[in-house]
Image (cartoon, rainbow, N blue to C red):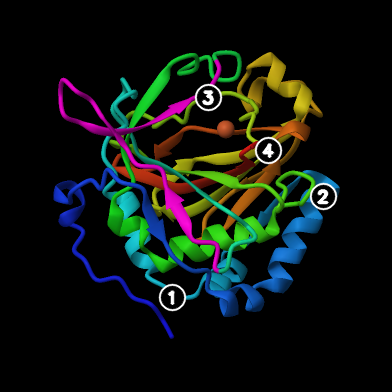
Amino acid sequence: MERTTKFSLDSFYSSEIDNHLQEIPSVDSSALLAAQPLTLQLRQALEYDAFVFWDSSEMSKAVGDANADILIKAARHAPLDPQDPRGNRHRYFGSGFFFPWQEGMPWSVIPPRVDPHSGWAFTSYFQPAEINVDAGGIVRRFHPIPHEIWQLPALRRLVDILFVSTPHALVSRQKPVVFNLHIIHLRSDGVRAAVSVPDHMHQDLEPITYVILLDRSKNAAGGVSHIGKAAAAHAAKNAQDVKDGDIIAKRTLTGKFSGLGFWDARVSHDVSPVYSSDGQPAWRSVLLVDFGNITI
Ligand SMILES: [Fe+2]
């Protein structure tokens, strides 16, 4: 039976932040079974090539109509990333963990922290300075993913499908699994480009990362995803500036839930800035998902 979540987008900013460990129950096992040809195809490509691109139609079919539109609208309303001095990168961030051997694999969402001075509830994220010269080496504070988004079946299905697609060599099913979700909305005001960070070929130092397009305005230009040789990450250069032959693949994600995944240690990656083709506001929203194991 289809699970539905009813709420208004207006409630996102006003909704109470749940500061306790939140549990999101149950995998939809029938949806995962139906997605088996896709998950097998993705896993094999990741094992052989270290990266994979997929189209909108196959992932949309696998995710179904499980409140997908609400997830897309939510991304469009994401709050400004407090670390973005240019003011055109918007973001929610959250993390959770689960135990692959547990019935239904319920998620435990890591609760936000609260700043004792301002009262702001935030989630925190760290990247070493050597991989993110733009915003690395500091603990970055982001707006937490609202409770209503965590509850969306479309989000749960997407993440489940990607977890099943992940090579076992990268993420063991015998250990607890931690995952990070970034909902990122790059928005050009029509003049200035919106830039992802780090803005050069790099590696994330997570075992595996997936990029899923949620939304791209028709007048958006740029936002081209690049996969390069791992060595290209050392140069910290934009895709257009690295040596000939160091870029292995590039593609512009255009359809809902089209995406790419990469085995981080074996390749580098980058996305070019998003700008407007007609002087009007233009945007690109993505969901980033990465997985790793918690060592106990
Ligand atoms: Fe990255």
First in sequence: mark 4 vs mark 3? 3
Residue 10: which quarter of the image?
Answer: bottom left
Residue 40: which quarter of the image?
Answer: bottom right
First in sequence: mark 4 vs mark 1? 1
Q: Position of residue 235 (x, y in %)?
A: 69, 15
First in sequence: mark 1 vs mark 3? 1
Q: Nearer the viewer, residue 125 or 187?
A: 125
Q: Are marks 4 and 1 in contact (CB under 8 Å)?
A: no
First in sequence: mark 2 vs mark 4? 2
Above or below 58: residue 90: above
Disc 3: CA contacts within 10 A as few (<14), some (14-19) or many (>=20) = some
First in sequence: mark 2 vs mark 3? 2
Q: Secondary structure at mark 4?
A: loop
Marks 2 and 4, how far apart at CA: 13 Å
Name the mark nearer the viewer: 2 or 4.
4
Q: Which residue is mark 3?
A: 199
Marks 4 and 1, how far apart at CA: 29 Å
Disc 2: CA contacts within 10 A as few (<14), some (14-19) or many (>=20) = some
Q: Position of residue 266 (x, y in %)?
A: 78, 34
Q: Which residue is mark 1?
A: 65
- The kind of residue on which mark 4 rests is Pro
Please tell me in which quarter of the rendered image ligand 1 is found.
top right
Q: Are marks 4 and 3 in contact (CB under 8 Å)?
A: no
Disc 4: CA contacts within 10 A as few (<14), some (14-19) or many (>=20) = many
Disc 1: CA contacts within 10 A as few (<14), some (14-19) or many (>=20) = few
Q: Is mark 3 within 8 Å of ligand 1?
A: no
- The kind of residue on which mark 1 rests is Asp
Q: Which residue is mark 2?
A: 47
The residue lying at 57 percent from left, 40 percent from top is: 224
